[in-house]
Image (cartoon, helix red, strand yellow):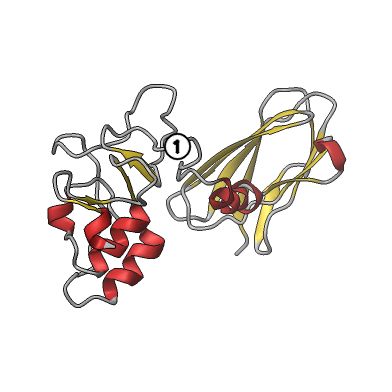
Amino acid sequence: MTEQLWNDELGILQMGASLPADGFSQDVNAYALTKTITSVTGAGLASPVPTHLGSPSKRSSPEVRPGPPWICSGQSGIPCPPRRGPTYSGAHWEAMKLDGSPLVHDVSLAHGWAMWPVHLLPRYVAGLYPLTPGWRDIGVEPVLADLSFVECSVATPAGEVRIPLVQQDDRSSGTLSVTIPAHSRAVVKLPNGWALEGSQEIAGDGQAVTRSFHKLS
């Protein structure tokens, strides 16, 4: 297999005999590293192995030591994804050509499923969630973690909801601003041990309403 797929001129292990000769894949490179067909320094490829497959594979090979992910700076002559153009997504490619363009149309590493934890930030750090369908009634329950500043905006069917939260250096007090669309309502609730100064309910008019809060002694 090595004799058939190794391209000595390009220094890459091809993904298959029927695939383009100038294409390379992170998974195939991980295999090449574990078999000592090539080395990290000798491959000359940007991001040559996947973090989820390459790291365990590299640890299983005594000849290859695991290291930090490769950084594609564009200054070393190795192929990097172009930062401009219709194919740029902000992420790397699972398989690409030597000019840095994607090998085929579906090899982006910007996987949608990898973004699922993002919803935890507005839901718990900022504390935003719908009390009723359509976000006409909005819950605001920040966790008040050890963060000095939090700012979050969420596009909802009713309009944009924005929450900036500031805590003082000693984390004993702070301010919370709530901007919600007209004809909507927000209910602010703080964790146990904290007190809100002012009404918990805020009527929406598209303008920011600020409430102070402090820690109970």
Residue 121 location, x and y as percent? 58, 49
Left/right placement of residue 49 relative to residue 113 reads left
The kind of residue on which mark 1 rests is Val
Residue 6 location, x and y as percent? 22, 54
Residue 43 location, x and y as percent? 18, 52
Nearest the eye: 80 or 67: 80
Q: Is residue 104 visible?
A: yes
For the point 30% across and 34% down, the residue is 100
Q: Is residue 125 visible?
A: no
Q: Which quadrant, please, contains the C terminus? A: bottom right
89 to 27, vertically: above or below: above
Q: Which quadrant, please, contains the N terminus? A: bottom left
Left/right placement of residue 90 relative to residue 59 reads right
State the image quarter where residue 61 is shown: bottom left
Q: How many marks?
A: 1
For the point 24% across and 64% down, the residue is 33
Residue 171 location, x and y as percent? 49, 55
For the point 41% across and 62% down, the residue is 52
63 to 200, vertically: above or below: below
144 to 210, vertically: above or below: below
170 to 159, vertically: above or below: below
Nearest the eye: 92 or 157: 92
- Mark 1 is surrounded, within 10 Å at the Cα level, by few (under 14), some (14 to 19) or many (20 or more) other residues, namely few
Q: Secondary structure at mark 1?
A: loop
Nearest the eye: 30 or 84: 30
For the point 58% across and 51% down, the residue is 113
Left/right placement of residue 213 relative to residue 186 reads left
Q: Which residue is mark 1?
A: 104
